[in-house]
Image: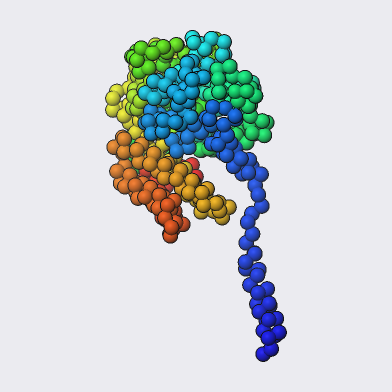
Amino acid sequence: MSTARLAALAGLAGLAVLPSCVSDPLPPPDPQAELVARGEQIFFNETFGGNGRTCGTCHPAENDFTLDPAFIASLPGDDPLFVAEFDPNLAANFENPRLMREFGLILENLGDFDDLERRFVLRGVPHTLALATSIGSPAGPRLGWSGDGSPGDGSLRSFATGAVRQHFTKTLNRVPGVDFRLPTDEELDALEAFQFSLGRRRDPPLPLPLRGTVPRRGQEIFLDDSLGKCNLCHANAGANSRFPGQPPGNGNFDTGVEALPDQPADLTGEEVPPDDGFGRPGDGTFNTPPLVESADTGPFFHNNSIETIEGAVAFYDGEAFNQSPAGRTLASLDPEGASIELDGTQIVAIAAFLRVINGLENIRGAVALLQDSLERRQRGPSRIAALRGRAAAEIGDAIRVLGGGGLHPEAVLDLERARRLAERARKAIFGREWSARQAIRALEQARDQLVEPGPTDAVRG
């Protein structure tokens, strides 16, 4: 056969296999996905010309987008979170380093910078998960611990403007264009899209068919409007109220947290002004947070005054709550005039329920992250590694949440295996996709030990 004919046949063979190489093109770009990706880049990397902080400084992805003393202790001394400790321009009236390190408290001036020495509050960092489910109310968005944490129109889009002015400034003069630059409209749109993309899209449809005896009883108490009464303000363990006399949606309540005795920050002798909550001046009310993520995002309440989920549940059986406006209103609605009266085993049962639904959400989130890492559009090695690293962190949260309550030890073993596989999928040279898929299988096995198969897939994705 001639050389020319061989070349022609080779060319035809090449054409014959060409369709198999190009018949599965990448999907067209998704504009919303691109906006979310842009927002993620801004959230974690953009300093807005300020003191080095980013949104991710106070809302790190690896710590459920919040801060606690243990995570703070793990940071290097030159982390931008500690800028008040090494920048003379911010040494006074910008943060209280002692209370930040010991209790995870961040100084907030609530938009008024006229008297920095006296007009401030100290608050924990609320996580930014499931915002799409938690900030809607008939009166407008509810953001931050007091529900009015966003300037201007109060929207999530505007939240970054207030954050940059408060936390990113180079000096206490806070002059835009000098001490920082304000986000552009495009950046605000992207940040909003990214934050709305985080976490759940819906609340779990309670009751769930839980397997554990104590968590199952905790769910019953939680949903009992004559006993636990939790579901009145946290419908389906979310942030939306169905409280009598209140419009549905996210609500503000005065629950008496400020009246608690022996608050940790007060015990230090540091100046901790009273926090009057919503409004200017405040009305003493604070925003209702979602409970699904609560067990692994403590400390609890706006001032980080209680460390454990069991302690947070027990607060509602105490004097501070039962003598508060919210507690007295509950009592007025009760045929026996009781607000909330729970015994120790009931408190532990509700906390066990909250631990389990938090673990289920950790599992759902980890599966979603691992599945994202296996999709063709996630081609960048660093992006894939980041997704699998976040999945491993979610699995670690589930292990701590369940293990901390002595719950479902067999599921914890499956979770430990899933975490090892997720880490291998992130770091190994060979078998990374196999490890990711095996991690998903182990997560599904753990999940099926927490909840019976049912007609809803709310805890599965």
Residue 447 in view (yes/no) = yes
- 50 or 310, which is in the foreground? 50
Q: Is residue 112 left or right of residue 399?
A: right
What x and y, as percent, mark residue 16? Answer: 66, 74
What x and y, as percent, mark residue 257? Answer: 41, 16
Q: Is residue 216 above or below residue 323?
A: below
What x and y, as percent, mark residue 43? Answer: 56, 35
Residue 400 is drawn in which quadrant?
A: top left
Q: So how many labels did they put on this image?
A: 0
Residue 149 in view (yes/no) = no
Q: Residue drawn 67% across and 34% down?
A: 186
Q: Residue drawn 29% across and 37% down?
A: 406
| Residue extending farthest bottom | 1
Residue 148 is drawn in which quadrant?
A: top right
Q: Is residue 376 above or below residue 31?
A: below
Q: Is residue 30 left or right of residue 351?
A: right
- The N terminus appears in which quarter of the rendering? bottom right
Q: Residue drawn 57% across and 39% down?
A: 41
Q: Is residue 321 above or below residue 11?
A: above
Q: Residue drawn 64% across and 59% down?
A: 25
**Colour mapping used in the image:** rainbow
| Residue extending farthest front | 88
- 120 or 134, which is in the foreground? 120
Q: Is residue 380 above or below residue 24?
A: above
